[in-house]
Image (tube, coloured by chain):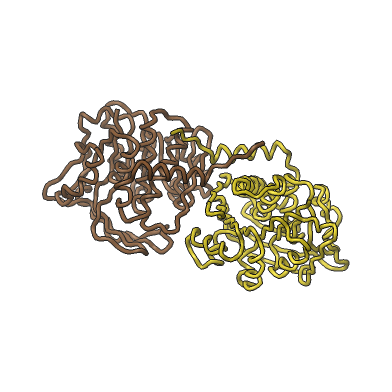
Chain colours: A yellow, B brown
């Protein structure tokens, strides 16, 4: 029984008010699989890299015991590259460069050894590729989580709506929920999106935490209040990886487990933003994570005796 | 032992995307005292009204058993009047009319019978009047909570800083916390504001809930996700009333009790926004409140077994 994660494995160059980086390792599948690896140990990724990616960079993933049989390497080609600059409030950013490179004609291949997949994370990518991936599993996984973004709503809405019909959980941010539903109120937005296919919806609100909707219930998870958000890149992917990693670990899909999964996703994302790129999530100890979960408990749990 | 609340008792005319009202009863002390009355039963208010306020309107307050000996009535004068229009997102509003009337030269008088005050809420008013009120208590109350707004930071910052030195808890919204501290990060803003006098700070974030800072701890309370916010007027006052009402009831100032007080304040504020003005909070039953508290529990409580 495995957790399969599809998404980009790529290079980023990031500028924030705290500094800037050269090309560093990024990509949705990179963040999500590293994050999930702290919770579950049979993780396999699907993706594509160029010859430029390099063994040392790949080691950030393989050193976590993550299976890369489904990660194609295209000789003579270059990896996907994104460069962006965050504004002072860290809630908005400008894309400076997008070079699709190997992603331009990405054909996701699912190795036979991946067919034991029970938990599938369709990380942020073209909805068409997300759908292809899903259809290439002979048996529908027990839980399919889809992450996407406003960009695909702008240019590939029909494809996105097609894949949405086949997933169990959708994770998007508040502005994306408003865009997808045409509703300003997040409650109305959620009600509408839950008629589009997913049984559960997670709305990520950055510094304001996350909302989980499903089974006629709502869960509101806080974000850890931080003095500085150093670099938000990958926080959403890290959240998604922690979320599905927790569910794969406990192996049972109940609303209470979903709640806990949101807390683990939030905790891992709270590390991610503390340094540039994947740096902060590369070497977390069990104690780091346990302490961070305790912070979320004291941050949000109360006890009213009546 | 009593809870004393000072603030405006006034008329409002409100326009929201859902409709508009004629002159209806409003005012910080009105909302806060009605809200607190569901939790504590020895409440006294300090304020001033004009001859136009009328007995029927006063009945909204007195019917809750609230003592109005400290509420001056100025014959031949008119009550404070505010009129405003909310924008579509409900997070911003334009003030259309402000008629100070009796508030222009308000001299707060504290009846002898109020000197048993142990819990004091200095509702949103001129900081100078808030300070005068506090100084007219012969014995410093056990807990002083101050509510204020950006308007006073703009025109009476020195007075505000003076009264801040003498209070235990400050409640403001996120934009006001940023304005008062000059810091964008709410964690940095809170750290700075906690050097200005208050031992505790509550930052109200509207639909994103509230943050409580103090004793080197942080508590994050959710807001109840609502399909429609009908009218946000008075929600902050209702929050403050529920907050201090709960603390007066339990009679002990610990961080855990403060957390619960924030939840009760949030629950009462969640009713307030469901209808225009004070309408929704005028006749709540114990069951209404108990059910709403249960909603906050299921909304935000989780149980991670390790």
- Name the quadrant of the N terminus of chain B: top left
**Residue sitting at 16 percent across and 47 percent down?**
B55
Residue A128 coordinates in the image, percent (x, y): 71, 70
How far from the left and from the top, in percent, is residue A49?
81, 63
Pick the front one: B241 or A218: A218
Instruction: Name the residue furthest left.
Output: B76
In this rendering, the answer to whether B88 lies above or below A17 is below
**The quadrant where residue B95 appears:** bottom left
Against A209, is B83 above or below? below
Residue A117 versus residue B133 in the image, above or below: below
Above or below for B8 versus A123: above
Residue under the image location 85 percent in, 63 percent down: A73
Q: Does the rendering let one see residue B18?
A: yes
Residue B187 % position (x, y): 53, 43
**Given the current orientation, which residue lies at the most extreme front position?**
A139
Kindly give the residue lying farthest to the right in the view shown. A75
Image x and y of residue A193, in percent: 56, 63
Q: Residue furthest top?
A: B139
A52 sits left or right of A293 in the view = right
Residue B195 appears in the rendering: no
Residue depicted at 32% across the width and 48% down the height? B281
Q: Is residue A11 left or right of residue B133?
A: right
Quadrant the C terminus of chain B occupies? top right
Q: How many marks?
A: 0
Q: Nearer the viewer, residue A183 or B161?
A: A183
* Residue at 61% in and 66% down: A150
């Amino acid at each position: 029984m495995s957790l399969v994660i599809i998404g980009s494995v790529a290079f980023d160059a990031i500028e924030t008010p705290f500094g800037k980086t050269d090309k560093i390792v990024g990509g949705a599948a990179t963040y999500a699989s590293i994050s999930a690896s702290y919770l579950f140990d049979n993780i396999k990724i699907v993706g594509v890299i160029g010859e430029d990616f390099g063994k040392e960079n790949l080691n950030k993933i393989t050193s976590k015991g993550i299976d890369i049989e489904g990660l194609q390497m295209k000789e003579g080609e270059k990896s996907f590259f994104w460069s962006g600059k965050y504004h002072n409030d860290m809630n908005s950013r400008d894309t400076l460069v997008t070079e699709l490179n190997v992603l331009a004609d990405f054909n996701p291949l699912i190795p036979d050894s991946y067919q034991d997949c029970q938990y599938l994370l369709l990380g942020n990518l073209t909805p068409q590729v997300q759908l292809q991936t899903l259809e290439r599993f002979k048996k529908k996984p027990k839980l399919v989580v889809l992450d996407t973004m406003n960009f695909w709503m702008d240019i590939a809405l029909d494809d996105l709506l097609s894949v949405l019909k086949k997933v169990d959980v959708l994770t998007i941010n508040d502005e994306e929920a408003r865009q997808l539903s045409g509703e300003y109120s997040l409650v109305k937005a959620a009600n509408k999106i839950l008629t589009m296919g997913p049984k559960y919806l997670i709305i990520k609100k950055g510094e304001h935490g996350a909302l989980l909707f499903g089974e006629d219930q709502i869960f509101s998870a806080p974000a850890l209040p931080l003095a500085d958000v150093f670099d938000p890149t990958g926080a959403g992917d890290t959240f998604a990886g922690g979320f599905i990693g927790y569910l794969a670990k406990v192996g049972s899909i109940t609303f209470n487990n979903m709640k806990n999964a949101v807390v683990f996703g939030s905790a891992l994302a709270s590390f991610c933003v503390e340094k540039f790129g994947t740096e902060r999530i590369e070497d977390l100890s069990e104690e780091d994570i346990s302490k961070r979960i305790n912070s979320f408990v004291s941050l949000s749990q109360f006890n009213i005796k009546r």
